[in-house]
Amino acid sequence: MKKTESKVEKKNNRIVAPYIIHIKNLTDEKLYDVKLFDYGFSKQEKIKYSCPISSVDYDDILNTLIGENEPREVIGTIRAMVFCDYKKFQSKQINCHFYVIEKNINGCEIRTPYDFTIDPYQSQEEIVVVTDLKINFYNKLQIQFVYLMPETEMTIYLYPTK
């Protein structure tokens, strides 16, 4: 029985297409507490949000997130690519940590800090990854970066499983 159950679990825990979000600091200043899921982004003048690579629009990702009352997907890996003309800003952004903020049933926020890590086997210095995550992708989720360096762009890949 256990062999059959484990095969079913593996089939049900399938990887789906990643969510790809691009954020860009449009200013010459370091921005603090930058939210990845900014519901008022159309009024945002300091940060540009987009999904240039994927077929899913940023609005669609936000609408999906709002509509999910129970988690159907779990984010297992977050990968970020950082681009900046100034290497100093790029390296500071790569060393930035972020928080996953979830609200529980009582409305209390749970803030979990994560650090990006550079894989010692990779050759690109602008890519960082966080693996072995179990972040529930639903309407009580927020991912917040401690800061976004001036004139810096980040492309964030969220790899969910169902």
Image: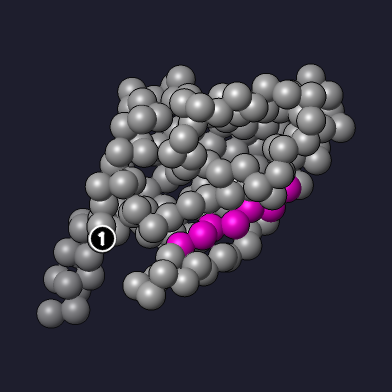
Provide residue 64's location: percent of width, then percent of height.
Answer: 29, 42
Q: Is residue 152 above or below residue 74?
A: above
Q: Is residue 105 left or right of residue 156?
A: left
Q: Quadrant of the N terminus?
A: bottom left
Q: Is residue 48 left or right of residue 150?
A: left
> Furthest residue to the right?
88
Residue at image coords 35%, 36%: 61
Please name whichever residue, 49 or 117, is drawn nearer the observer in this view of the structure: 49
Query: Which residue in the protein does label 1 denote?
Result: 70
Q: Is residue 63 above or below residue 120?
A: above
Write the start and end of the magenta stretch as one range: 96-102
Please name whichever residue, 17 or 40, is drawn nearer the observer in this view of the structure: 40
> Furthest residue to the bottom?
1
Residue at image coords 39%, 58%: 140
**Magenta span main SS:** strand
Element at label 1: loop
Residue 118 visible somewhere in the drawing: no
Q: Is residue 53 left or right of residue 80?
A: left
Q: Is residue 90 above or below residue 131?
A: above
Provide residue 3's location: percent of width, then percent of height.
Answer: 19, 74
Residue 54 visible somewhere in the drawing: yes
Q: Is residue 93 magenta?
A: no
> Furthest residue to the front?
43
Number of numbered discs visible in the structure rendering: 1
Q: Is residue 95 above or below residue 45?
A: below
Disc 1 crowd rating (10 Å Cα; few below 14, some 14-19, many 20+) is few
Q: How is the image coloured?
A: one colour
Amino acid of disc 1 = Glu
Residue at image coords 56%, 44%: 35
Provide residue 101's location: percent of width, then percent of height.
Answer: 51, 60
Residue at image coords 25%, 57%: 69
Please name whichever residue, 123 or 95, is drawn nearer the observer in this view of the structure: 95
